[in-house]
Amino acid sequence: MELQFSDLLKEVARGRKGSRDLTIEEAQLAARFIIENKATPAQIGAFLASERIKTESSEELFAFSDTLRLHLVPPIPIPWRIDPGLDTVGPFDGRQNSFFATIPATLIVRAAGVPILLHGVKSPLPPKKGTGLFDVLSALHLPLGSSANDIQCTYQQLGISFLDVEIVCPPLQRLRPIREELYFRTLFNTVEKTLNPANNARLIMGIFHLTQRRAILGLLSRLNYQEILIVQGVEGSEDLYVHRPSVLWKVTRDHTEEITINPVEIGLMPTINRMSLSPSEQAQAILHILAGDPHPLRDLVLYNAGVRLWFSRCTSNWQEGVELARHLLDTGQAKKIFQQWQAWRHYSD
């Protein structure tokens, strides 16, 4: 007899002791029920709450990631660019007390010739609902596009773009009201970061809780990236701290390597990235850094850009990456990328 969604819900909703992880086939079926709008809002809410209590397995996470990828717009038969690109992904619920070092770091990485996509959503999700990446990019007066074609065209032509995941994956937009009513972290907070619509080669991704590290690493090892770098950065973001060592996980299909790096090794200013800044204040800080002005957050940006440059194989180690980042910033090449993006108007539609 064909399984119904209620049958799958029963298996994950029996409480901590009675519930079980779904098989990959069952999880794929559950994902289709939810993503293809064949389950009721009450059923979806109950499933997501039950999974949160049980904790999701890597197979369940992969099933939802893989099913969401089938609903991407446009479909993904070929990469958006020939040269290997980098996806950078932080939390889609925004930030409350930190600087978006990822934005100037992204401009520096693009100045080194690496195509790079910043993932996010237009309006931050629960549970934080803080300042979002879109808010700061808008304050910088960057053209962010309003359709999947805009996003793809910008990335193909400039090698840099903001990717609104809800635009390229409509089911996530449809599920937003349920997630906003639940107001807690669900499996979608993880899987929405893993869709890779541009078929990029590499992903750097922030995670919030180490308690789910094993399941997340299991999920990531199944994805269609060549390499993935996992960071437990500030507020669960991809931005490393510059005032203390960080542990990173480099993931491929066959291997996971744990790496500890310490910015003190090369004498970077140990600024603590704990500050509440409005989008306009974030934008002003970024403009000062791009202009080459002295700024307390400059070394934070250089450090994060340096790690990205090393991960993208522009340098043989992260220390050399920091030096390359310094050169690209001081010579105005990162600022030039910003100006090109700001001037971009040739939308596809």
Image (cartoon, rainbow, N blue to C red):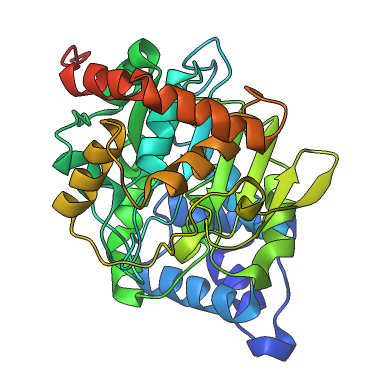
Q: Position of residue 102 (x, y in %)?
A: 41, 43
The image quadrant where one finds the N terminus is bottom right
On the question of residue 149 being in view, the answer is: no
Q: Position of residue 227 (x, y in %)?
A: 69, 34
Give me the residue at 38% from left, 29% from top: 107
Nearer-the-camera pick, 332 or 215? 332
Give me the residue at 70% from left, 29% from top: 226
Q: Quadrant of residue 182?
A: bottom left
Q: Position of residue 335 (x, y in %)?
A: 29, 24
Could you tell whether 100 is left or right of 235 in the image? left
The image quadrant where one finds the C terminus is top left
Nearer-the-camera pick, 149 or 328? 328
Q: Quadrant of residue 154?
A: top left
Give me the residue at 66% from left, 25% from top: 315
* In this view, 19 is above or below 292: below
* In this view, 190 is above or below 324: below
Could you tell whether 54 is left or right of 327 in the image? right
* In this view, 113 is above or below 138: above
On the question of residue 184 being in view, the answer is: yes
Nearer-the-camera pick, 159 or 265? 265
Q: Position of residue 344 (x, y in %)?
A: 20, 16
